Image (spheres, rainbow, N blue to C red):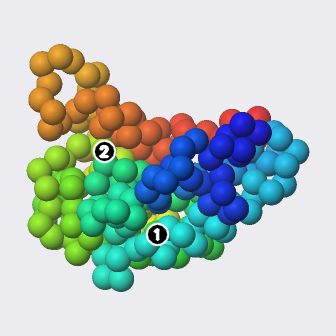
Amino acid sequence: SAIKSNEVSGSTVMGGDFTGGPTYYDYAAPAYYPAFATASADSSWTQLVGGELTQLIGAQNGTTGLTPDSNGSNVFGYDAVRSPWRVGFDYCLHGTAQSQTYLSKVVPFLVNYATSNGGPSSLKLTIPLSGSPMGSDTSGTINGPAAIGAMMAAANQTFIDDSYTYLAGTIVPETSTQSAIGPNYFSSTLGMIGLLTLSGNFIDYTSL
């Protein structure tokens, strides 16, 4: 109830319990709104699924399908990168048609780029919405979400398999000696979420 009161406006999620901030499209978590509806006996939570996905799809670049970090940004960076994971996980659990629409625009760009440039490790943050040139950070931060999004279609199996191999060999505990570019808490977390989802171990606890 507190989350809904402070962080939901109509059928979309705000940037937190403050006003006047930007819209962060990656805050959409459509896989879990049905669980919130069940736990709270408040069916209006389900309205967020369509509202959030409509907003996310509307923010996609027409060519690459990439979304900006926020409505004040022009790059696909450390905020926006979470969207393929969250929407991909929704499609895995619920098969939501709008999630498929979002993924069908961004996943081909990510998969085709990796396929043409040496594999998953070629995906690097941050990325202009046009798709080029890519930045310098290649890690679980982008590879985990990209691989989860790619689970939308069996045609992406080679990319998924290669991503799993890359993530399994890359994700290590954070240490004080690691550089800013490379495995750290954020990349390790998103990479581990990728590994859990790809291996079938990120289970839906709401179904237990």
Residue at image coords 62%, 73%: 97
Residue 188 lies in quadrant: top left
Q: Is residue 37 left or right of residue 62?
A: right
- Of helix, strand and loop, which one carries label 2? helix
Residue at image coords 35%, 58%: 69
Q: Residues within 10 Å of mark 2 (few under 14, many from 20)?
A: many
The amino acid pointed to by label 1 is Leu
57 up-or-down from 83: above or below: below
Residue on which disc 1 sits: 103
77 up-or-down from 100: above or below: above
Can residue 96 be seen from the camera position used here? no
Residue 109 lies in quadrant: bottom left
Q: Is residue 158 left or right of residue 134?
A: right
Estimate the x, y position of residue 174 in percent, counting from the top left.
26, 22
Residue 83 lies in quadrant: bottom left
Image quadrant where one finds the C terminus = top right
The amino acid pointed to by label 2 is Thr
Estimate the x, y position of residue 180 in percent, counting from the top left.
15, 33
Can residue 121 be seen from the camera position used here? yes
In space, the residues marked 2 and 1 are separated at their CA atoms by 18 Å
Image quadrant where one finds the N terminus = top right
**Disc number at residue 187?**
none
Q: Earlier in the sequence, mark 2 or mark 1?
A: 1
**Disc number at residue 141?**
2
- Of helix, strand and loop, which one carries label 1? helix
Estimate the x, y position of residue 74 in percent, counting from the top left.
27, 66
Judge by depth and name the residue closer to the eye, 1 or 96. 1
Disc 2 and disc 1 in contact, CB within 8 angstroms: no
Name the outermost residue toward the front.
20
Name the outermost residue toward the right.
41
Q: Residues within 10 Å of mark 1 (few under 14, many from 20)?
A: many
Judge by depth and name the residue closer to the eye, 79 or 148. 79
